Image (cartoon, grey):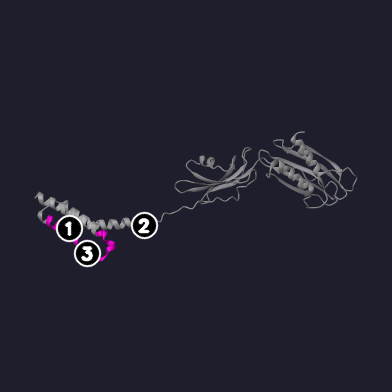
Amino acid sequence: MNDSKSILIVIFSIIGTSTNAQDLNCSQGSSVESYDKRLENSDNAENMSCFPDEHYCDAIICTKVGSHGFSAIYWGCAAEYMVDDVGYLGLKATLKEKFGTSFKCWRLYGEKDKNMDNLKFTRPPVPNGLMCLKGEMDANGNGAVTRGLCTDEEHYCFKARCAKDNGEWKMKYGCSTVAGNCDFVSAKRDDDKCLCVFGEKDIDFSNKNLTIEIPTVMTTPTLTTLTTKETTTTTTTTTTTTTTTITTEEPTKPTTTATLELAQSTINEGNGVCASNGVHCYLKIIAIVCAVQALIVAAQQFNAL
């Protein structure tokens, strides 16, 4: 006996039938349509009597989307209203073993002690496939996100945040054949870098309430410190390098004398700073170096005369 037939037998045994003549008569049987025949297709029902303690004609409807999609209805009798009895729970357990959790079932009841009151319940069409939110929307709310149908190969709904190097970003929604890999989204968006999250397999609109954790962009506070240091160094250099700009004109003896005097003055000033504040002694070093350079230039000018 093949697997699909054994499942069908279990389903019928769970729902149960009775041939005893009782007051309540209900339609009992099934109608099943399956894409991949994991459930054997069927369409049969007949008028049969219920057990003495059963007072409701009911119907259980189950559907699944995706490439393994199906639609099934099981008519029968129920003892109590709105109670998940052994038959209903057993049917769901059988389907779960075959399809996992990616299916939906619900139960409908006729009026109490009303014959054949479950004939009004019919099997819905087989769902076309997985349904997901699809579309794009940028940070300003431009774009559109709508409900869309996935292909038979796509089993996951995803949500992605895709950003360009210039900081622009968009939220993208759609269907995916795999979960856990965002490369296919990035490849479709040129230079974009994407972060993705995925919903459960074969669950409609599972990307509706997904949350994407955005990494915090860290700033480097030392940039301000570096800028301050550079500004300080530049100010000091500007003050001391004025001694070298004097030599841009053709040197003369008076200019050489003035340069020597300025160099000596700079050295004296550096000594004074170092004596008054040891923390700033490095100024003295800078002043001495500049003064020596000025003396060398002055000597060269003097010899050239």
Asked whether residue 97 is in view, the answer is yes
Label 1 crowding class (10 Å Cα cut-off): few <14, some 14-19, many 20+? Answer: many
The residue under label 3 is 272
Helix, strand or loop status at disc 3: helix
Task: Say which of marks 2 and 3 sits in front.
Answer: 3
Secondary structure mainly formed by the magenta segment = helix
- Give the extent of the magenta segment: 255-283
- The residue under the point 26% across, 61% down is 281
Q: Describe residue 56's horizontal placement relative to residue 166 as left or right.
A: right
Label 2 crowding class (10 Å Cα cut-off): few <14, some 14-19, many 20+? Answer: few
Q: CA distance from mark 3 to mark 1?
A: 14 Å
> Residue 2 occupies which quadrant of the picture?
top right
Q: Amino acid at mark 3?
A: Gly
The residue under label 2 is 225
- Mark number displayed over residue 263: 1
Considering every residue shown, the one lying at the far left of the view is 305
Q: Nearer the viewer, residue 182 or 294?
A: 294
> Residue 292 occupies which quadrant of the picture?
bottom left
Q: Quadrant of the N terminus?
A: top right
Task: Say which of marks 3 and 1 sits in front.
Answer: 3
Disc 2 and disc 1 in contact, CB within 8 angstroms: no
